Structure formats: C-alpha cells, structure tokens
Amino acid sequence: MRIILFLFCMIVSSYGSIFYVGSMKSEGIYYSSLNSKTGSLTEFINVAKLTRPSFLSIDSKNKRLYSTNLTNWKNPGEIVAFSINDDFSLKKLNQMSSHGGNPCHLTLSPNKKVLFAANYNNQGSVISYQLDNEGFIKNIASHKLHFGSGNHPNRQKEAHAHSIYPHPKYPYVYSADLGADSIFIYKYDLHSGELNFIKKESLTGNILGPRHMKWDKQGHYLYVLNELDLSLHIFKYIKDGLIKEVHKLSALFDNKNNMNLTAAEIRFHPTLPIIYTSIRDKDDLNRDKISVFKANGDKTKLIDVIPAIVNFPRNFNIDPTGNWMLVAGQRSKNIAIFSIDSHGVPSYINNKYIFPGEPVCIEFFNN
C-alpha cells in the first residue's frame, strides 16, 4: 500500500493541488489532486478509515489534519488528529471525545495552537482543545453548552451549534447556532484555548438558521450564511469581540420557488472580493445552486446564481490559484469541476467525477 501511495505521490506532486475529502457512507477520508491547467482530478485514494468524517481542518504548514467523527447517534462524537506524510497519506496521532452529539464543524486558531469544534446535537455545544507542538490533541480546554431556541417547529426546538470560527486577528471565536438564531461569542486564551463567554448575538429576523460563516481577511466583516431562509447576514467588528449587524440580503434573486431549499456552505475566493454560497434542494428537483456575491461589507450584493450541477451540494471549495471550484454532491455522490473567470464567476467545464461514497467536505492542502 505504501509503495502504491509513493508512486501516486510522485505523479500528483507535479500534477497540481492536493485536496482531502471528508465523507459519509464510505471508507473515511480520501485525497486526490487537481490539475491546475486542465481542472482534471486524479483517482480518489482512501487514507483514513473513519465512520463519519464530515468536516476537516488542515494545518498545511505543519502538515496536520484534524477531522470530526461519529460512530453512532447515541454517544458523543470524537475529534481525530493526523499528521500528513510526504506521500500525502495520513498517520493517526490521537483522538478525544467531542463531549457532544454529532460534531459537525471544526477549525484551528490562527496560531495553530488551539482547535475548536461544534456539536450539533444534545442541546448544542462548542469545545476547545489545546494542541502540543507535534500536533497531538493535548487536552480539552473548555466545553460550553449553548442555550436558546427559535420558531421553526422541527429545527429550532433547542440550540444547535453548527460551526465555529476564530477572528483572524484578535483572540475571539464565534459560533453560529442554527437552533437559537444567534452567534455565540467567546474570548479564548491563545495558548491554553480556554473559552470565556462574552455574548449571545441574536440575528434580526425569524427562522433564519445560521449555519456557516466567514471573516474577511482583515477581520472587518463577518458573513453569516443562514440555512433556513437562504440569506446572508453581515456583521461589522466593533471592538473587544463585539459585532454589529449592518446588512442582510437573499442568496437567490427569486425567492418564490424556495420550498425545501437549504443553504449549506460559504467560501471566499482566495484573492478576489467574491463570496460563494451553496443551496441544496431537499426535493431533488435540480434546484441546487451556487450563489456569487461581490463582498463589500454593508454594500455586499448578489451578482450571479448558477446551477450547482450536482445534487445536494453540502460543501465546495476553491483551489489556491483561484481558478477552479470543486462542488461536492452529497446525494449524487460526485464532484463537479468549475472554472472561475477573472471576475470570480464559475462556469461548469463538463467534468464530473464519481466519488466512492458521499463527499461532504473538501479541504486543500496548500503545501
């Protein structure tokens, strides 16, 4: 197996950008390579056997990968640490409990010393871990239960932490809670990772369902994607971790035919002031979309909406060059390739790749 991976490594190292795929109903975590000239992909290679690695976070500089995992719905999930070998295979370092049901998101602090994760089920909670110099999960620094509810009869009976993101410059971390229609704000210790609750910031509106978010590179604005009402809320950073809502807009031009559509992922273009979001069709009527925004704080506007090609695009990502978008179809079990023009608008290039399972997270290894 190691010989095969080494030979594959020799091919992909000159081929393009390496990326890893978290999945469901498959063998675990896979990797492949994107040809930066043609947009073609190499074979998907399984590098870690996990039951449900639904979200990944990569420390490219130190060659480490962290994954959520869920073995069953009754017990708490787990967070698993790996080192990335020279042949792009993964070596398991260790794992720890997520102390909550269905860990659905995780991310690293800017200094790579703290790992944050969000648990969706069992009231919803966030957890922080201190990492040692070798990338091992050293200990649990904090575990914070969320609170509150919303008006959706099924999805908002209680809090459901759906993601967590640190500020790019200051020691604060923000968790989007779908069930409580709120952003939970914490201050964290840069080295120990200990969390201290600051504020629960409620979003203006009703049955919104904040899911994923992104800060701009300067940390001036936080862009929050709402799963349930297909909207983008924009907050401005004020001071001491506090934020203020300054703008809200729809992720679609036409909201008349949006029954059973849900928003999923949000990404920034690596070099352009462009934001992308994905829209999933729960009814499988081919209404899956990628929305394109011109990011400009409170003047942000929707500029294009294109078909996602795949069914149920739970996740997508843009390669480090900014020339290619990979869209993962959870239900169609494939990944579609889009080229991105100089204005940041994606176009499907008639390339789709069958994936051995349900692809639900794509993360690039920017080596």
Image (cartoon, helix red, strand yellow):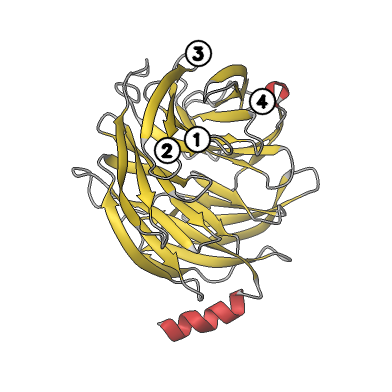
Residue 311 visible within the image: no
* Chain-order first, disc 2 or disc 3: 2
Q: What amino acid does circle 3 point to?
A: Gly
Q: Which sits in the foreground, 214 or 315?
A: 214
The residue under label 4 is which amino acid type?
Answer: Phe
Query: Mark 2: which secondary structure?
Result: loop
Q: Residue furthest right?
A: 342
- Frontmost of labels 2 and 4 is 2
Q: Neighbour class for label 2 at 10 Å: few (<14), some, many (≥20)? A: some
Disc 1 and disc 2 in contact, CB within 8 angstroms: yes
Task: Give the labeled residue for mark 2.
Answer: 189
- On screen, residue 245 versus residue 346, left or right, reads left
| N-term-proximal mark, 4 vs 1 | 1
Q: Residue at x 25, y 41 (%)?
A: 99
Residue 171 badge:
1
Mark 3, residue position: 205
